[in-house]
Image (tube, rainbow, N blue to C red):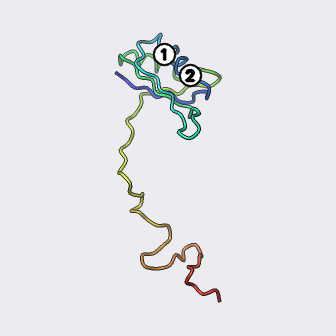
């Protein structure tokens, strides 16, 4: 089974339309159009899972760059999502310009304890 990334989708594309597009190349296991979690609108890309690897390769070769709804599709083998490290901030949990135990003078802000004059 091979998972394909389908990018540059028109925002009104449906899962049924994608299934119809990929079906001539082999059995389609699943189609998932990714949507924005707040608005529910399409994010312009999807994942298509094909049962046979050879069929997926044929679909990539034929459909990559093909016009679909007025847009040239980008199709390639989906890469696994990189693992998240779980809660820590990049850069060692930095807090902007603050120094440990000191004031944040890097951006010219005054602390509430700073005198005005």
Q: Quadrant of residue 69?
A: top right
Rate crowding at label 1 as few (under 14), some (14 to 19) or many (20 or more) other CA atoms within 10 Å.
many
Residue 43, horizontal then vertical, whole percent: 56, 34
Q: Is residue 55 above or below residue 86?
A: above
Residue 110, horizontal then vertical, whole percent: 58, 79
Residue 12, horizontal then vertical, whole percent: 62, 25
User: Which residue is at the front of the view, 109 or 76?
Assistant: 109
Q: Residue at x 50, y 78 (%)?
A: 103
Rate crowding at label 2 as few (under 14), some (14 to 19) or many (20 or more) other CA atoms within 10 Å.
some
Q: Is residue 101 above or below residue 2?
A: below
Residue 30, horizontal then vertical, whole percent: 42, 21
Quadrant housing the N terminus: top left
| Numbered mark located on residue 22 in the image | 1
| Numbered mark located on residue 66 in the image | none
Left or right relative to 49: residue 117: right
Q: CA distance from mark 1 to mark 2?
A: 13 Å
Secondary structure under tag 1 reads helix
Q: Residue at x 54, y 74 (%)?
A: 106
Q: Residue at x 55, y 17 (%)?
A: 17
Secondary structure under tag 2 reads loop
User: Which residue is at the front of the view, 25 or 16?
Assistant: 16
Mark 1 touches mark 2? (CB < 8 Å): no
Quadrant housing the C terminus: bottom right
- Per the image, the residue denoted by label 2 is 14
Q: Nearer the viewer, mark 1 or mark 2?
A: 2
Q: Quadrant of residue 49?
A: top left
């Amino acid at each position: 089974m091979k998972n394909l990334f389908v990018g540059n989708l028109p925002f009104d594309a449906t899962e049924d339309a994608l299934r119809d597009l990929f079906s001539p190349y082999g059995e389609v296991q699943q189609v998932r159009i990714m949507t924005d979690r707040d608005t529910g609108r399409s994010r312009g890309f999807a994942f298509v899972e094909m049962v046979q690897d050879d069929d997926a390769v044929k679909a990539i070769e034929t459909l990559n760059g093909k016009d679909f709804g007025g847009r040239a599709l980008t199709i390639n083998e989906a890469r696994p999502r990189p693992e998240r490290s779980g809660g820590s901030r990049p850069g060692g949990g930095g807090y902007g310009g603050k120094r440990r135990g000191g004031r944040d003078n890097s951006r010219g802000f005054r602390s509430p304890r700073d005198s005005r004059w």
